[in-house]
């Protein structure tokens, strides 16, 4: 099995990149011959701007941009999609949101035609979401931020396309949080392709 790990952080020394690396290590430690690819959106200079060409594609009046086609091919090759990202303003960074805006196109991730009927096209794709927050668990619970994130990301994006969110985890700030997060990320990687039951970690440190 093959995983595509998408990372959205400009600093390769960040905890976000460390979590992605430990998650990938967990995949290789699963003793099942699984593989992974890391898509570092910042290092690869992916353009997240939704342009006139993207609008034309959405309206089925344009051609598929080459960079979008390349990202879709990456996902098509994967048996699981993993997103690792810092929480910016209680959501994902603009770079990652722009990647979704441009890559999850009408006609590929879903079909929405003139008859206003929605066809979800990513039902075969398991998704694993790993967010890194800068606030503690109490802040997220008190304001309902994590629930709001799950609504807009897990349901609003991936359920809309039919993709099954298997892991939805938020690593919060806390004492010695970096060490705990790296260990937890490795555990997520080891269990990434476990098909018995649904694994969902919420508010995990």
Image: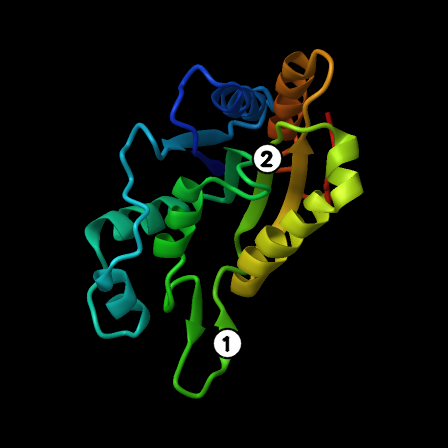
Q: Nearer the viewer, residue 28 or 182?
A: 182
SS for tag 2? strand
Q: Residue at x 43, y 29 (%)?
A: 9
Which residue, given by chain and number where applicable, does mark 2 sit on?
131
Location of the C terminus by quadrant is top right
Where residue 147 sits: x, y (%)? 72, 49
Where residue 33 sits: x, y (%)? 51, 27
What's the distance in space between the residues labelled 1 and 2, CA to CA? 29 Å
Q: Is residue 102 left or right of residue 137?
A: left
- Whether residues under marks 1 and 2 lie with C-beta atoms below 8 angstroms apart, the answer is no
Where residue 150 sits: x, y (%)? 66, 50
Task: Indicate whether 200 appears above or below 13.
Answer: below
Give me the disc on residue 118.
1
Give me the disc on residue 154.
none
- Colouring method of the image: rainbow
SS for tag 1? strand
Q: Residue at x 58, y 60 (%)?
A: 156
Query: Would residue 27 be visible to someone looking at this image?
Result: yes
Task: Indicate whether 136 appears above or below 74.
Answer: above
Q: Residue at x 59, y 35 (%)?
A: 130
Q: Is residue 45 left or right of residue 170?
A: left
Query: Would residue 202 be visible to someone looking at this image?
Result: no
Number of residues whose C-alpha sits closer than 10 Å to that of mark 2, classed few (under 14), some (14–19) or many (20 or more): many
Quadrant location of residue 115? bottom left
Q: Is residue 92 left or right of residue 43?
A: right
Q: Which badge, 1 or 2, comes first in the chain's sequence?
A: 1
Task: Indicate whether 75 appears above or below 188.
Answer: below
Number of on-image labels? 2
């Amino acid at each position: 099995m093959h995983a595509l790990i998408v990372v959205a952080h400009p600093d390769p020394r960040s905890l976000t990149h460390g979590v992605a690396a430990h998650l990938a290590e967990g995949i290789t430690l699963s003793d099942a011959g699984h593989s992974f690819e890391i898509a570092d959106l910042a290092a690869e200079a992916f353009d997240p701007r939704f342009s006139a060409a993207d609008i034309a594609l959405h309206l089925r009046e344009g051609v598929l941009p080459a960079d979008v086609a390349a990202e879709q091919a990456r996902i098509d090759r994967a048996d699981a999609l993993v997103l690792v990202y810092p929480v910016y303003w209680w959501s994902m960074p603009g770079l990652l949101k722009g990647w979704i805006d441009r890559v999850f196109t009408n006609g590929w991730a879903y079909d929405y035609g003139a008859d206003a009927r929605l066809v979800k096209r990513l039902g075969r794709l398991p998704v694993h979401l790993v967010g890194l927050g800068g606030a503690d668990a109490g802040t997220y619970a008190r304001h309902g931020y994590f629930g709001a994130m799950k609504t807009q990301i897990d349901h609003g994006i991936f359920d809309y396309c039919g993709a099954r969110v298997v892991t939805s985890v938020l690593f919060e700030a806390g004492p010695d949080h970096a060490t705990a997060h790296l260990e937890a990320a490795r555990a997520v990687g080891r269990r990434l392709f476990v098909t018995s039951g649904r694994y969902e970690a919420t508010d995990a440190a």
